[in-house]
Amino acid sequence: MSVQLGDSLEHYHQWDTPTVIVSDGGYGVLGFEGDTSDHLALPQWYEPHIAAWSKRATPSTTLWFLNSEIGWATVHPILEKYGWRYMNANIWNKGKGHIAGNVNTPKIRRFPVVSEVCVQYIYEARINGLELKTWLLQEWKRTGLPIYKANEACGGANVATRKYFDQGHLWYFPPPEMFVKLQEYANIHGDPAGRPYFSLDGKNPGSLEQWTRMRAKFSCPHGFTNVWERNALHGSERFKSNGDNGKALHLNQKPLDLMAMIISASSDEGDVVWEPFGGLFTACMAARSNGRRACGAEIDLTYFHYGVKRLMQEVRQYPLFK
């Protein structure tokens, strides 16, 4: 595990390639030193970080972007601009207990907010500058074979034409073994002048391992949906400056179990997790306790001090990976 004081922009180049990035940065609510005063400035705040993530990400990388609904909405176009493909918006419902006192709804003229979003993105796989779904169809057309023959290659009635060659939102990433079936069929029956087909280097057909790395990891934990019923942190779970009697250090500390869930769902043991805006390093803690390697940074000296203190308590209590 590696955590550093300072702007993460100065450290990304030192970190190992990420399988998971957990972003819990500016919300546009002046929640910490350096946060913007409203959501309108968030795209400019995030863009250099998103650009840096894209340079280091691979098609195996998943980004979990935590924010308010309006904060995420303003940053989403920047994420798309740099090659991040939206997968799913997950809602953390903190429950009615999250409402502080009696909310004057006639004055605020809206329903009380008890939620945040945690949006799942993957880094778009591209070959020769083309999105993977575009390249797949183009590569098959290059063989000179009729499109319907791809179904024969995959051993299904219309699995390739309906799923793998679809160019809209119904497109499915072919399982790696289907990539192999498509390329084997194409290289046997396709125009000999164009061989090899479905090659990443122009010399050899892709391997099962290479196709596997073209897709982000994901394994949905049993019983979970995209709405997470989880109360906000209270009591001993909330990290305080002076033990249980002190003041809560962080305005929006994330639950360790939610961090562990998203990290475990999108990575394997030994994979690298980035936490660019560390705060109290909850994602780093969750990564370490689940056998992942963590890299994090925090620009605020106070947060960094207590975040490291929290991590050291974890290391002393659990010296080895669980």
Image (cartoon, grey):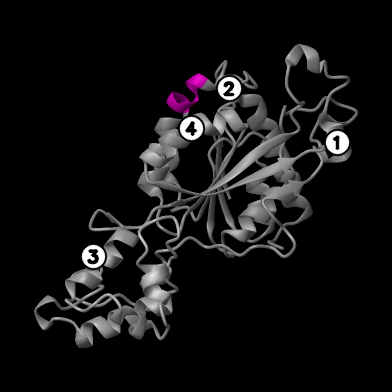
Residue 202 as seen in the image, left or right of residue 158: left
* Mark nearer the viewer, 1 or 3: 3
Tell me which residue sits at (61%, 65%) in the image. Answer: 219
Q: Quadrant of residue 81?
A: top left
Query: N-terminal of the two: label 4 or label 3?
Result: 4
Region in magenta: 40-45
Any part of residue 152 in sight = yes
Q: In terms of secondary structure, where does tag 3 sit?
A: helix
Q: CA distance from mark 1 to mark 4?
A: 30 Å
**Residue named by callout 1:** 234
Q: Quadrant of residue 300?
A: top right
Q: In terms of secondary structure, where does tag 1 sit?
A: loop
Q: CA distance from mark 4 to mark 3?
A: 32 Å
Query: Which mark identifies residue 138?
Result: 3
**Residue named by callout 4:** 75
**Residue named by callout 2:** 28
Query: N-terminal of the two: label 1 or label 3?
Result: 3
Tell me which residue sits at (63%, 61%) in the image. Answer: 291
288 vs 184, nearest the viewer: 184
Query: N-terminal of the two: label 4 or label 2?
Result: 2
Give the residue type at disc 2: Gly
